[in-house]
Each structure stands twice: as structure tokens, then as C-alpha cells.
Image (cartoon, rainbow, N blue to C red):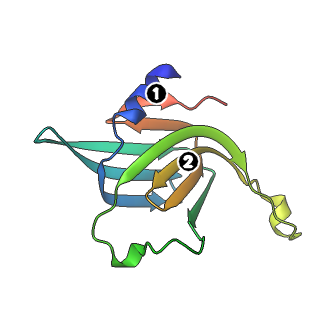
Amino acid sequence: MENINFKLNQLYYSTIRNIDVHLISKKVSLDLCLTENGRTEAHTLQFVGCSSLLWVEKMDQSSTFDFTACNYYELTSVQLMKTATTSSHNWLKQYSMEYNVAVEIWEAVLLLNAKEVLVDNQRFSIPK
């Protein structure tokens, strides 16, 4: 687990060039560009075996960030953590709303329940 966290931490502050959500193949991919000390590197971050995802934007009164007006998106953090949401709606109760990955992109978070993560094609199992 320490090795996967080290790899993910190295991607912080990357510019997100593209996010591809492919529901049928259960994959979420991010194309990243990291510039450090005048050197630019391309990276890929892919979550495989996704059974659920949830996109949430910060909603407090002081937040003025507008994703639609921005032409630059930055990967703030990736946390491997368990969290869950609930619903009192009868129809939604039949679906799992548990997540094990939190991908923070500025004032928003993408919650995923994934089996594996690939960092530049290096595969890591996400601990249960």
C-alpha cells in the first residue's frame, strides 16, 4: 500500500488534460501533464473495475469556483479511503454507494469504487 500511495503522491499538481469515463468497460482514465523544475512529463492514471462513481462539487456559500469557465484543471490529491453515502429513497437503497478512492480536483471530488489503479501502466490492486 505504501508503494501505491508514493506513486499517487508523485502525480499531485498535475494538469488534467482529459478525463475519460467509460461505463461499459468500467474504467476511468485521466491524462495528466506534470511540470516540475522546468521539465514536463506526461502521465496516465486509470481506475479499473469501477462499480460506482460519484462527482461532487463543493457547495458552500463562499465557493465561487466555476468548472465550466476554467480552462485549467489540476489533480489536487488521490486518497485511497473507504467512504459511503446513503439515500432514504427506496429505489436507491438497492445499489451500493460505497467508495474506496477519492480523486480531488480543486473544488470537487470524484469518488470511485475501483478494483485496481494503473499509474503509467504500472498496476496496483486497491486494498479492500
Q: What x and y, as percent, mark residue 9? A: 40, 34
Look at the numbered disc 1 and give the secondary structure of its residue.
helix
Closer-to-camera residue (1/38): 38
- Decide if residue 27 is on the left or right side of residue 90: left
Quadrant occupied by the C terminus: top right
At 53% from the left and 22% from the top, the residue drawn is 1
Residue 67 placement (x, y as % from top left): 41, 72
Q: Which of 35 and 88 is in front in this view?
A: 35
Residue type, numbered disc 1: Ile
Q: Residue at x 50, y 49 (%)?
A: 103
Mark 1–mark 2 CB contact (< 8 Å):
no
Q: In this view, does 125 lie to the left or right of 106?
A: right
Percent across and percent down for residue 72 are 28, 64
- What is the three-letter code of the residue carrying label 2? Ala
**Does residue 55 lie above or below 118 as drawn?**
below
Dividing the picture into quadrants, the one containing residue 85 is bottom right
Q: How many other residues sit within 10 Å of disc 2, few (<14), some (14-19) or many (≥20)?
A: many
Q: Which mark is residue 120?
A: none
The residue beneath circle 2 is 102
Secondary structure state at the residue bearing disc 2: strand
| Above or below, comparing residue 27 to residue 81 in the picture | below
Measured as percent of width and height from the top left, residue 2 is found at 49, 21
Residue pointed to by mark 1: 4
Looking at the picture, tell me which residue is in the foreground, 95 or 104: 104
Instruction: Identify which residue is drawn at 41% across, 49% down.
Output: 76
Residue 54's place in the image compared with 121, above or below, is below
Q: Work out which residue is located at the far front of the displayed protein and give it.
A: 62
Instruction: Point out the residue furthest to the left here.
Output: 38
How many residues crowd mark 1 within 10 Å: few (<14), some (14–19), many (20+)?
some
Q: Name above or below for residue 22 compared with residue 9.
A: below
* 3D distance between C-alphas at marks 1 and 2: 14 Å
